[in-house]
Image (spheres, rainbow, N blue to C red):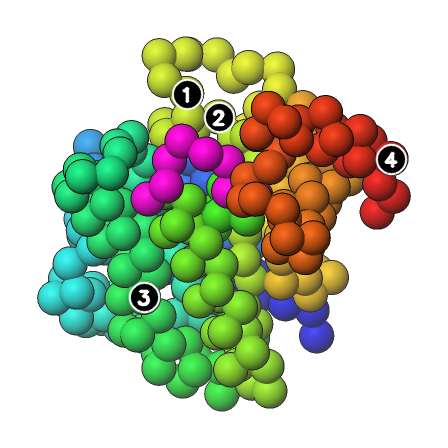
Amino acid sequence: MPAADVFTSGSSALITGGASGVGLAIAKLCRSKGMKVLLVDVNTDALQKAKKELVGENCAESDVVTTVVDVSQVDAWASLKKTAISAFGSIELLVLNAGIGARGTWGDQDYFTKIFQTNLFGVVNGINTFLPVVQEAAKSKPTSIVITGSKQGITNPPGNAAYNASKSAVKTLAEHLSWDLKNTNTSVHLLVPGWTFTGMTRGGNTEKPAGAWAPEQVADFLYHKMQNDKFYIICPDNDVSEETDKKRMLWSVGDIVKERPPLTRWREEWKKEAEETMAQTKV
């Protein structure tokens, strides 16, 4: 059966970073399939607003549960596990989506600590706490774990070392989890959004730029890729195609294979060759 069968009426989803953006869009997808959802976020007001959006005429209020949790705090996950089991009894879909963006540089300890604690250990904490719960549910139903990564963790553009490193580590964790669960009834997926109009990316804008995707497009892309049992779910956007993403990734890996300096795509002495090579590359 395809991995998308996890979106089944009566099953339950836990979504971190679920009060807005991609997390909320996935929650809406879950609700459209008749699933119960547990939204986890640090923003109380956003959680209340999200619940109002998700509780419709034909939805019992108990089918949408919200809880304020800082995913970087390992102790908070034990309480979250109790909340999830008390509310739904099981979790079939675990979406580890919470993340933060920040800017900093070398010597800025808070910059590195805050990003790693949320973006990396928020995922580690979620897997370590809820993998047994998901595996228990897998004895009778399809189950899945979706982990949100970033293209910055793959192509590694300069300018935000901590964020890129955190998302690169998340990619590695997801790959190993997929390997370890390959013979089980739990599928694993790395969701990598493109330019998406969310609270993290919009800045002061109130209207979606033409080049960006809406969060709902990301959720829909996730669903269709899961129908085809894909692990890597690399979303395009209205400016960057899937083909362009692949060319950029191939060039980045080429730095290692061809023993070039790192990050040559952005180095002045390599930019022209990078652009010409990517233009000619067939994928």
Q: Earlier in the sequence, mark 4 or mark 1?
A: 1
**Residue at the spot 27% in from the left edge and 60% down from the top edge:** 121
Q: Earlier in the sequence, mark 3 or mark 1?
A: 3
Whole-angstrom CA distance, mark 4 to mark 2, is 31 Å
Q: Label 4: few (<14), some or many (≥20) within 10 Å?
A: few
Q: Earlier in the sequence, mark 4 or mark 2?
A: 2
Residue that numbered label 1 is attached to: 202
Residue that numbered label 3 is attached to: 124
Q: Earlier in the sequence, mark 3 or mark 2?
A: 3
Whole-angstrom CA distance, mark 3 to mark 2, is 26 Å
| Contact? badges 4 and 2 (CB < 8 Å) | no
- Say left or right for 107 vs 65: left
Front position in the image: 198 or 166 = 166
Residue that numbered label 4 is attached to: 280
Q: Label 3: few (<14), some or many (≥20) within 10 Å?
A: some
Q: Label 1: few (<14), some or many (≥20) within 10 Å?
A: some
Looking at the image, is mark 4 or mark 2 nearer the viewer?
4
Secondary element under disc 4, as helix, strand or loop, is: helix
- Say left or right for 173 vs 227: left
| Contact? badges 1 and 2 (CB < 8 Å) | yes
